[in-house]
Amino acid sequence: MAQDKEVTANRTYKSSVFTMVFQEKKELLELYNAVSGKHYEDPEKLEINTLDNAIYMSIKNDLSFIIDSRLSLYEHQSTYNPNLPLRCLFYVADIYSKIALHKDIYGSTPLSIPDPQFVIFYNGEQEVPEREIMRLSSLYTVKEERPKLELEAVMLNIRPGHNQRLMEASRTLREYAEFVERVRKYAKTMVLEEAVERAVTECINEEILRDFLEKNRAEVIKVCLYEYNQEEHMKFVREEGFRQGHEQGIEQGIEQGQKEGQEFACLTNIRNLMKNMDWSAAEAMKAIGIPEEKWQGYEKKLNESQK
C-alpha cells in the first residue's frame, strides 16, 4: 500500500495540469495547429518524445513532440523566468542525444535531425507582453553581436484578454486558461482545496474542460494543490529572504536573512504538502526539490516544531 502511495506521489509532482490537459495527441495537435497556423488533422502524425525524468533538480520538460520533421518543445510557466532559454538548451540536447543514440555520430555521413521550435505559455500574474522572444545569448557574460551559439524561445501570454487569435484557434487552451484563472481568483478568499473544488465543479457545469475534469477530477485537484504550493513557495522564498536580509542592513545579514527566509519557506511548504497532499516528509521534500543530503536536517526541524 505504501508503495502504491509513493508511485502516485511521484507521478503527481512530476506532472502539471497543463501537461495533463495536452498529453493526449488530439488536444496537442489542436494546440500545435493554433501556434503554427498549420491545419493537420491526423493526431497520429505526432511523435511524442517528452522527457520522462528530470535530469536537473526541479527542471522537467513539459511537452515535446515531432511532426513533419520539426521538433516542438512546449513549456508552461506561471512565473516569469529569464533562464528558460538555458533550460530549453538542456531539453533539446537531451532529446537530440536520444535521437542519435544508435546512430554513428563519428561517421562521414551527416545525420538528419529535426528543426527545433521552443514555445512558452505564460499565465502568471506578472504583466508581460503578448509575445516575447527570449534568447540564450541574453544570459552570456560576454555579449557579442553574433554569438556562436544561439537559441530563441517565444513566450506567449495566455492570460485572459491576451493573444485572442491563438486562444480562439485552440478551445482547449482557452478553457485551460479560464480554469486556472478561476482557481487563482477563488484561492484569494477561500481555503485552497475548497477553491480548487469550486473551480472544478463550476467548469464541469459550464462545459469548460468538462470531459477532462470529469475523468481526472481527483488527480487535477491534487496537482493544483501542489502547483499552487510550489508557486507560493518560490514567491515566499524571494520575499522573505529579501525582507530578513534587508532588516539586517549589512552584507552578512543579507546572506543570513536569505538563508533563514528560504529555510522557513521550505518548512512551511513541506508542512502544507504533507497536510494537503497526505504525503510523507520525504515525498514533500522531493517534490519541492530539496537535496537528499538536507532531508535529515529538515526532518529534525519539523519534529522540533511539533514539540
Image (cartoon, rainbow, N blue to C red):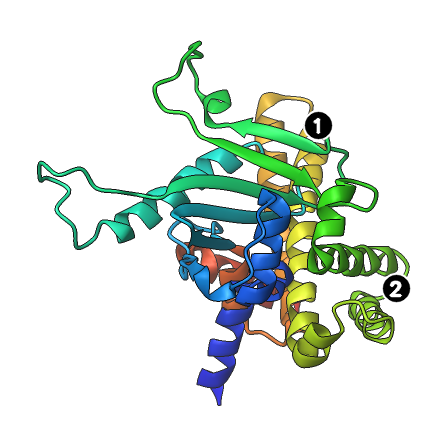
Residue depth check, mark 1 versus mark 2: number of the one nearer the observer: 2
Spot the residue most to the right. Answer: 189
Instruction: Give the residue drawn at x 75%, y 40%.
Output: 163
Residue 296 quadrant = bottom left
Residue 135 is left or right of residue 89, and the answer is right
Residue 294 is left or right of residue 101, and the answer is right
Image coordinates of residue 119 in percent, x first then y, are 56, 42
Image coordinates of residue 141 in percent, x first then y, are 43, 17
Residue type highlighted by circle 1: His
Q: Which residue is mark 2?
A: 190
Instruction: Give the residue drawn at x 55%, y 69%.
Output: 12
Residue type highlighted by circle 2: Met
Q: Secondary structure at mark 2?
A: loop
Instruction: Give the residue drawn at x 48%, y 84%.
Output: 4
Q: Which residue is mark 1?
A: 246
* N-terminal label among 1 and 2: 2
Quadrant location, the C terminus: bottom right
Image coordinates of residue 303 in percent, x first then y, are 58, 68
Spot the residue most to the top. Answer: 145
Q: Which mark is residue 47?
A: none
Residue 235 visible somewhere in the drawing: yes
Residue 86 quadrant = top left
Spot the residue most to the bottom. Answer: 1
Q: CA distance from mark 1 to mark 2?
A: 31 Å
Q: Secondary structure at mark 1?
A: helix
